[in-house]
Image (spheres, rainbow, N blue to C red):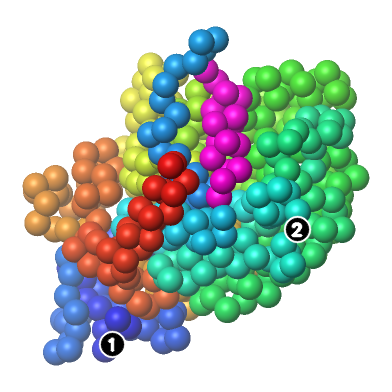
Amino acid sequence: MYAMGGLWFESALLPQGWARQVRLTASDGRIAEVSTGVAPGADDERHGIALPGLPNLHSHAFQRGLAGLTERRGAQGDSFWTWRELMYRFVERLDPEQLEALSALAFVEMLEAGFTHVGEFHYLHHDREGAPFADPGELASRVVAAAASTGIGLTLLPTLYAHSGFGGAPPSARQRRFISDPERFARIVEASRKAVASLSFGSCGVAAHSLRAVTPAELAAVIAIAHGGLIHLHIAEQTREVEECLAWCGRRPVQWLLENCPVDERWCLVHATHASVAELHEVAARGAVVGLCPVTEASLGDGIFPAGEFLGAAGRIGIGSDSNIRVDAAEELRTLEYSQRLALRARNVLAREPGASTGRSLFELALGGGWQALRPGKPTGVPGIAPGEPFDVVTLSPASVDLIGREGDELLDSWIFAAGRGLVDCVWRAGIKRVSGGRHRERAGIERRYAAALRTLLA
């Protein structure tokens, strides 16, 4: 339901900090007014604790169907590369309706976890044999339909994937559903832009899958197709990727990108796990966002991104759920901080300054960096619960035992480091209440479609 009249909160995190007795009103899916220190109106819906919804800057929604199915050790050990083969086998059977069903459940779980907008890094473009659909945006439209049915905000990122390795290596048979040349990709992007135009606050950027999947000329084509808009790509996720890039051109992946491309505030470098200190300082100076996916990076054994070093250089980060094996905004933030603690044998590594809350620091970093990576033309800074912003609001359950005696930043610390997604109570996206009591209002039907799709895929 739309927020009629107003919403009133005992406390809310605003861009300027925590405020008490906060009243919000909505207009056309955006926040119209924010009043503090006021009594609730007679018709206001009342809640305890309000936070701005978080952006999820990197997702492959269809991979939700793989959760729990890749945890068996192979004869020669396992890595990202062996996981990738299992993912390819799964993709070979996926049809458009199944893609929509799997994506819808992932989007439901994102909303229930406190994510209100997702950047969908979309590289699955063709039919099972690798042939283009009559509509080049067939599968992109299925992702858009899943977003529409769940209500999540969407930045669609159609992705060029042309090769299996650096230097234009021919693609493998199992990559056939991803592969396009720049001309075909331009048609996919055009169709994607038309599809996403139907969504409230929907947008479309572009992506190159990785430096190993495009040639320099093809990456230049992606940049041109962006028309000055958002550009995402995976980079330096694996040590093998760094080694192969060095063998190809004598440069590390991030080093090559910085030397050859106009990397700036429009860019999101996903993972960058194995970037050097010098590279990270240059990325920070250029204003690009590094997209971190801590749960997936841990699952795949990628390594640990040197977040403290990057943030010390005023770097910008956001978080993503990537493979969607666990969809939980709080868990992503907690895993990011805990990985730094393990690497450095220290605590509260990513708190902004002495005495600062680690939870508040992480939350605001993810909020600012995530929105920079997902909103075309959005100024940098910290967005949130403010007039003119999308009415994307998350409430935490004040009755939880994890919040006893907490206030202010302690609420965020307790959500991230103690309670997790179970603490999310209600979620509004663009002024419409999508989640109540921790459950998406369309979950039952979406679960049924997901179950039917997965049973067929796994038969």
Alpha carbons under labels 1 and 2: distance apart: 45 Å
- Density class for disc 1 (Cα within 10 Å; few <14, some 14-19, many ≥20) is some
Magenta region, mostly helix, strand or loop?
A: helix
Residue at 62%, 76% (x, y): give it.
197
- Point out residue 214 in the picture as x, y percentages from the top left corner: 81, 41
Q: Sequence-wise, which precedes: disc 1 or disc 2?
A: 1
Relative depth, front residue between 423 and 366: 423
The amino acid type found where label 2 is placed reads Pro
> Which segment is the magenta one?
78-94
Vertical comparison of 348 with 92: above or below: above
Task: Tell me the tag on residue 4.
Answer: 1
- Point out residue 82 in the picture as x, y percentages from the top left corner: 57, 23
Relative depth, front residue between 258 and 128: 128
Relative depth, front residue between 171 and 298: 171
**SS class, disc 2:** loop
**With 135 as the anchor, is 405 left or right in this view?**
left
- Density class for disc 2 (Cα within 10 Å; few <14, some 14-19, many ≥20) is some
Residue at 68%, 61% (x, y): give it.
205
**With 61 as the anchor, is 209 left or right in this view?**
right
Residue at 74%, 18% (x, y): give it.
243
Magenta stretch: includes residue 273: no
Task: Tell me the tag on residue 187.
Answer: none
The amino acid type found where label 1 is placed reads Met
Q: Quadrant of residue 344?
A: top left
The residue indicated by pointer 2 is 132
Q: In which quarter of the image is residue 69?
A: top left
Name the image quarter holding the N terminus: bottom left
Residue found at the far top of this picture? 76
Observer able to see residue 424: yes
